[in-house]
Amino acid sequence: MQQHNNCACATVTFEIQIEPGTQRERQNIPHNMGELQDLSLYIHDRISCLEQTLHLSLVDLPPGQTKKLGQELFALDKLLDEFERKVGQMNNQLKHLKELEELFDSRLEDVQHLNDSMPAHMPRRKCPATGNEPVLKQNEAVEVQPENVKKSKKKHIREMEVITMPEFESIPQYMKGRVTYDQLNAAVQSINTAVTAKYNILHQSVKSLNNSMRKLQQRFKEQETKDTKGRYFVVEEDIREFTQMKVDKRFQGILNMLRHCQRLRELRGGGLTRYALL
């Protein structure tokens, strides 16, 4: 009789332990994948509860309590199915994230390769200063007044575009000789420097210039012909005047390459060769 009372007490205790397995609590089971760990702990607790129930299986449970035990087993089965589904979703997302990581690493390598392979000169209207390009003579640069420079900016001065790598590779080897891609574009910058300096002077009023600048402006105007109308051009004397480039056989070879790339053309007349920008 005493043993039966103990079993009854155990039964009462078990009934209290499994009471949280109601429909209302099961509806509050976490479904968010971020709370998957909570779901796992919840299932573990329910399994522990059922293990305790199995230990009491020797006890004759009332029919109502057996029904509750079956409901708990059914609910646990559903939770396990949901748990497996969540784990599958996380595995798929992990696989997708790994693919994205590989794709990102590949794109990063491509960008790094482009950055490392960036040529020193890129096609653009105005070449950036590199620190090695020829500059105006110091005495000439000082004599230009800031007010006059501001006025000259109102008129656009055309410049020669740099040579692209495909254009450089299209130049015949006998024409290139030992001239490199960077050296060719350095010459382009020097010609642009001379063109800019010349037409900055031409665009200024005579009253704003000193004597030496007035003589240069007059010389520039005398060199113009009907063929140069509307064109920007320089002569060899301008290259010597405004840049540090040597006008020699190598310079003539560079001019041939620029003509091949359709950057300039020669206009002859009056015993003078003019190099007009295209």
Image (cartoon, helix red, strand yellow):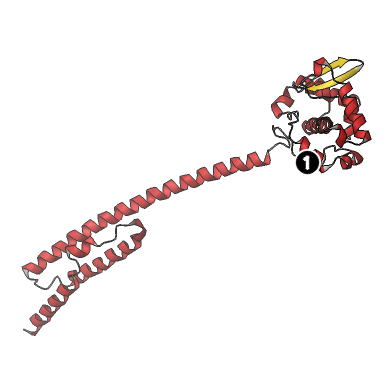
Instruction: Give the x, y percent position of residue 109.
Output: 59, 43
Image quarter (top left, top right, bottom left or bottom right) of the N terminus: bottom left
Q: Do we see residue 33 in this rendering?
A: yes
Q: Image quadrant of residue 266?
A: top right
What residue is shown at x 83% (from left), y 22% (from top)? 275
- Report which quarter residue 233 is drawn in: top right
Q: Position of residue 126 (x, y in %)?
A: 73, 34
Judge whether residue 183 can be spotted in this image.
no
Asked if residue 252 lies left or right of residue 260, the reply is right
Query: Does 92 appear above or below 13?
Result: above
Viewer-closest of 168 and 237:
237
Packing grade of label 1 (10 A; few <14, some 14-19, many >=20) is few
Q: Residue at x 85, y 23 (%)?
A: 253
**Picture coordinates of residue 142, whole percent (x, y):** 88, 43
* In-image side of 113 versus 212 (left or right): left
Q: Three-letter amino acid code at disc 1?
A: Thr
Return the residue found at the far front.
207
Q: Is residue 155 left or right of residue 269?
A: left
Of 199 and 133, the residue lying toward us? 199
